[in-house]
Image: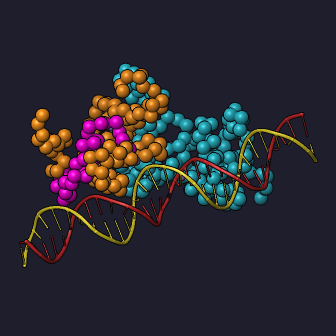
Chain colours: A cyan, B orange, C yellow, D red
Amino acid sequence: MTTATQPPRHPAGLAQKLADSGLRSTPQRELVYDVLLNKRDHPTADEVFARVKPELPGISLATVYNCLETLVQCDLVRAVNFERGPTRYCPNLRPHAHFHDEVTGQTHDVDLPETLFAKLKSELPPGFDANAVEITFRGKAKSSAN
Amino acid sequence: MTTATQPPRHPAGLAQKLADSGLRSTPQRELVYDVLLNKRDHPTADEVFARVKPELPGISLATVYNCLETLVQCDLVRAVNFERGPTRYCPNLRPHAHFHDEVTGQTHDVDLPETLFAKLKSELPPGFDANAVEITFRGKAKSSAN
DNA sequence: CAACAAATTGGAATGATTCTAAGGTGCAAG
DNA sequence: CTTGCACCTTAGAATCATTCCAATTTGTTG
Ligand SMILES: [Mn+2]
Ligand SMILES: [Mn+2]
Ligand SMILES: [Zn+2]
Ligand SMILES: [Zn+2]
C-alpha cells in the first residue's frame, strides 16, 4: 500500500481565509477544521477535543476553544446554541435552520429556501434592521435521517 | 388618600394555573410573576431578583430561580436564550419572535403572523415533526421602540 | 542566529444555574 | 386545636462550560 502524506480533507480555503485575517495556519487549526468537516453532527468543544486528541495528543482544550473561535471569526464555521446547552459547531455555511431532536438530543441541519429568510426579515416592524435570523425547531425526527 | 390593599396586577389565572399543576400560590411566586408582567423587558433571573427584593427583602436568588422555573412549567412564562447569555424571561404567550439589538443589548418582542410559523413547519423535510419553532433576529433597532 | 509576534498550553478564575440540607408554612386528619 | 406531612423557601456549596492568565513554544523577519 502507498504511504504518501495524507492530503488535507478541507477546501484549501482555510489557509487563505486565515491569512486574510492576518492569522497563521497551524496544525491545530487545520485539524479542528478537518474534524468539523468530517463528521457534521454539530459537536461540542469537548467532542471536538476528543476527536482531535488521537491525532495530536499534545493539544489542549484551551486550544480547541481558541481554534473554534478563530474559525467562527473567519466565517468558516458557525456556533450554534440551544437552550443553555454547550455551544455546538457547524461547518455548513449555507443559510439553514437547526432541528433539535428531543428524543436523541441530535442536531440536524434543515435547508430552507432563502426566500423564507427574506420573508421573515420583511415582516419586521419599521425601524428594525436585522442582519441575521436564526431559526430553531424542536421535536421528534423519524428514526432515519441518522 | 385611601389605603386599601393593593390589588394583584396579574390575571387571577396564576393561582388557578398553579393549582392545576398541584402547586401552591405563594407570595414569592405572585411577586415574581407581577414583576415580569409589569416590565416586559425580558429580565434575567438576577434582574428579577433585584426588582423583587425591595418588596420582599427576605427572598433568595434560589427562590427566584425556583419561581421562574415553576412559571415556565405552568406555561405562564417563556424562557428565552440568546448565545450563551443568561436566560431571560418573557410573559408574552402569543407566538412571537425575538429581536436582539446588538447596540443596546435589549430584547424586543416581534409579533409574526401565525401563518409564518405554520409555513416554516411545513418546510421541514418528511420525517421531521416539530412541536416548537424559535425565531431570533439580531441587528440594530432605530432608537425608538424603547 | 536574534528579536519579536503569534499561538499554544495547563491551570486558575468566572458566572449562571443547580443541588443540598436545613428550616418554614399551612392545610388535613385525628 | 395539635400533629403530620407535603410543599416551599433559603443559604451556601457544587457544577460545568467557557474565559483568563502567565509561562512556554513556534514561526517569521531582518
Ligand atoms: Mn462546548
Ligand atoms: Mn439569569
Ligand atoms: Zn448546522
Ligand atoms: Zn418575548
Q: Tell me the quarter of the picture where residue B94 sits.
A: top left
Q: Nearer the viewer, residue A138 or C11?
A: C11
Q: Nearer the viewer, residue A127 or B34?
A: B34
Q: Residue at x 36, y 27 (%)?
A: B146
| Left or right relative to C6: residue A45 | left
Image quarter in which the N terminus of chain B is found: top left
Residue B43 is situated, as x and y percent measured from the top left of the image, at 36, 41
Q: Residue at x 45, y 31 (%)?
A: B104
Residue B105 is situated, as x and y percent measured from the top left of the image, at 44, 34
Q: Nearer the viewer, residue C9 or B66?
A: B66
Residue C23 is situated, as x and y percent measured from the top left of the image, at 28, 68
The relative height of residue B20 versus residue A129 in the rendered view (above or below) is below
Tell me, yes or no, whether the highlighted magenta stretch contains residue B71.
Answer: no
| Left or right relative to D7: residue A143 | right
The relative height of residue A127 versus residue C12 in the rendered view (above or below) is above
Q: Which residues are magenta?
A: B17-44
Q: Residue furthest front?
A: B1
Answer yes or no: is residue B42 visible: yes
Q: How many numbered marks, from 0 up?
A: 0
Q: Residue at x 32, y 52 (%)?
A: B64
Residue B9 is situated, as x and y percent measured from the top left of the image, at 19, 40
Tell me, yes or no, whether the highlighted magenta stretch contains residue B39.
Answer: yes
Answer yes or no: is residue A115 visible: no
The relative height of residue C20 versus residue B25 in the rendered view (above or below) is below
Q: Residue at x 12, y 40 (%)?
A: B3
